[in-house]
Image (cartoon, helix red, strand yellow):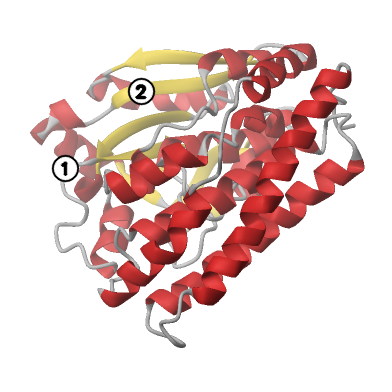
Amino acid sequence: MSVTTEVVTTPVGPVRQLTATGRLVNADPTMYLECRQRQALSYLRAVTPMADLLTYGALGRTTDYYRHCAIQQQPRWTMRQDLCDIEDIAALGYEVQWMGHADLDLLPRLPRLVAAGQPVTFYAPAADVGYWADLMRRRGRPDGGGRGGHGVMVCGVSEDGKWLVTPDTTDEGPEFRPEYLAVAEVTAAASADPEHWFVDCLSLRRTGAPQPEMFAERYRQTITGLQDGFEAYESLPQLLLTDRARRPDLDQQVASADLLRMLAGSRNLFHRFLRYTSHSPKVVTTYRRLAALLSQSLGRAMGYLSGQGPDDPGPWRRELQTLRTAEVTCLRQLKAELAAGAVTITLPG
């Protein structure tokens, strides 16, 4: 699928944007990834069906997820995930072009980069990114997210040069929607706080064909070395009960919900990778079902945390023990099939 641009009519007038802009679908519907990982994976999925190969390492260790969310009390999106690194993007046939900490000189370069089919991403203070600050205020952050960095992905520029097209997940659901930043406002904000604008700026450029053998070998190494007792499933019922007692604001950080989002999201991404492997249909189907069950558990947990139903954690213990057993069995079978012979990758047609 070639990467091209198109001129479309928008609320800010005609814009030239990457054609993939209108095809963006959130690759991380449980919203557990850091924002720029979500943007990169979603963009690459919109331009190549092979993007799901990037998720071979999505399983992670559930013990690490539990430690991050429950013990360290850190937001889910601050945990680094082994997805979309430079080497894997190169194996997909794309090059990451780093621009480092850019300045206002980036703005006149954006039309040329977009015309060349290259999205550009960088971090900017959340409170300065108007549409994101509005979302944060709706979710109880009067500071609009403060000076913490939010990932901005530029996919287009208006024909008059006054607006940037920056699609993002800013509605009350998980999907991308069109967003726009006024160049004049960006210029003023970046001039006032150059330290926090255009941080870690990069673009993506298509360079060649994907190398499935590279993903197959990296996948083998990742799963062979993965050790996980899945104790997080045993700890979750008590964590849910403790969080429920606080009657938390579910738009804010809640350890049990964050942990479930990470479990459901990672299993969903891993299943998408498995579809392109020669693993047995039983394994692929089991992971698909596991991801679906975890997503359902997440939905029920949000109701439980808001006070719906009785406090009794017994049903949660039984449900999560069943899921833990499935995880243990699935990982054992993955390793057995890898030990039995080469697991190959078939590129989607």
Left/right placement of residue 322 relative to residue 301 reads right
Left/right placement of residue 338 relative to residue 151 reads right
Write the residue at 27% across / 43% down: 72
Q: Position of residue 229 (x, y in %)?
A: 56, 39
Q: Position of residue 138 (x, y in %)?
A: 28, 69
Q: Nearer the viewer, residue 133 or 234?
A: 234
Using the numbered discs, state the Cα–Cα distance from disc 1 to disc 2 in whole angstroms.
Answer: 17 Å
In the rendered structure, which amino acid carries the disc numbered 1?
Answer: Arg
Q: Is residue 20 visible?
A: yes
Mark 2 nearby-residue class (10 Å; few <14, some 14–19, many ≥20): many
Q: Nearer the viewer, mark 1 or mark 2?
A: 1
Write the residue at 54% across / 22% down: 204
Picture mark count: 2
The circle on residue 201 is: 2
Mark 1 sits on what residue? 147
Q: Secondary structure at mark 1?
A: loop
**Looking at the rendering, in which quadrant would you find the N terminus?**
top right
Write the residue at 48% across / 49% down: 232
**Looking at the rendering, in which quadrant would you find the C terminus?**
top right
In the rendered structure, which amino acid carries the disc numbered 2?
Answer: Cys
Q: Position of residue 261 (x, y in %)?
A: 49, 55
Q: Secondary structure at mark 2?
A: strand
Q: Nearer the viewer, residue 17 or 235?
A: 235
The circle on residue 24 is: none
Q: Nearer the viewer, residue 279 or 189?
A: 279
Residue 66 position (above or below residue 82)? below
